[in-house]
Amino acid sequence: MIEAKQTYCGQRVRYGDFFRVWDVHTDLPEEDAIKWCFEHLYNNRVVPPIQEWKANIGYGAPKFNDAGYYFAGYYSTRKFEGGFEFTICEPYAD
């Protein structure tokens, strides 16, 4: 069983990154729950976790000059009792 509720959608500061945040309550393993989140909450778009994204955009990294990869964004999770917070971040593009 998975229950998800969106708790935030928008920019936290003017000219800042765009965030979508859900509280996800589930008894599934985390990998399965994240896959479900991408399928049902983010319309089958898949972005890398924040650690992988940061490693790939650094100077000399494989995606250093790839604007498409950078602006696609990343996801992060934060566990809490009975589930986790699922966050998608799309970097600001002027």
Image (cartoon, rainbow, N blue to C red):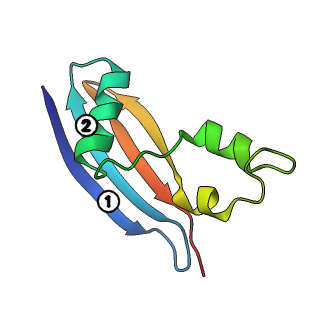
Q: Which mark is residue 81?
A: none
Vertical placement of 76 versus 84: above or below?
Answer: below
Kind of element beneath mark 1:
strand
Q: In what quadrant of the picture does the N terminus appear?
A: top left
* Location of residue 40 in the rendering, given as x and y in whole percent from the top left corner: 22, 45
Q: Quadrant of the C terminus?
A: bottom right
Residue type beneath disc 2: Val
Of 69 and 15, which appears nearest the observer?
69
Q: Nearer the viewer, residue 16 or 42?
A: 42
Crowding around mark 1 (Cα neighbors within 10 Å: few <14, some 14 to 19, many 20+) is: few
Query: In the picture provided, is 42 more to the left or to the right than 12?
Result: left
Identify the residue at horizontal 16%, vertical 31% (top origin): 2
Picture residue at 35% right of the left edge, 39% below the top: 85
3D distance between C-alphas at marks 1 and 2: 13 Å
Residues at marks 1 and 2 touching, judged by CB atoms closer than 8 Å: no
User: What type is the residue that disc 1 sits on?
Assistant: Tyr
Element carrying mark 2: strand
**Residue drawn at point x = 38 percent, y = 23 percent:** 31
The image quadrant of residue 23 is top left
Badge 2 is on which residue?
Answer: 24
Classify residue 68 as left or right of residue 60: left
Q: Is residue 1 above or below residue 21?
A: above
- How many numbered discs, if any? 2
Q: Residue 8 carries which label?
A: 1
**What residue lies at 24% left-to-right and 24% top-to-bottom?**
82
Of all residues, the one furthest to the right in this rendering is 60
Q: Where is residue 42 in the image (x, y as percent from the top left)?
A: 31, 51
Question: Compared with residue 34, is residue 50 higher up or lower down, i.e. above or below?
Answer: below
Tag 2 or tag 1, which sits nearer the N-term? 1
**Residue 39 location (% of width, % of height):** 27, 42
Q: Residues within 10 Å of mark 2 (few under 14, many from 20)?
A: many
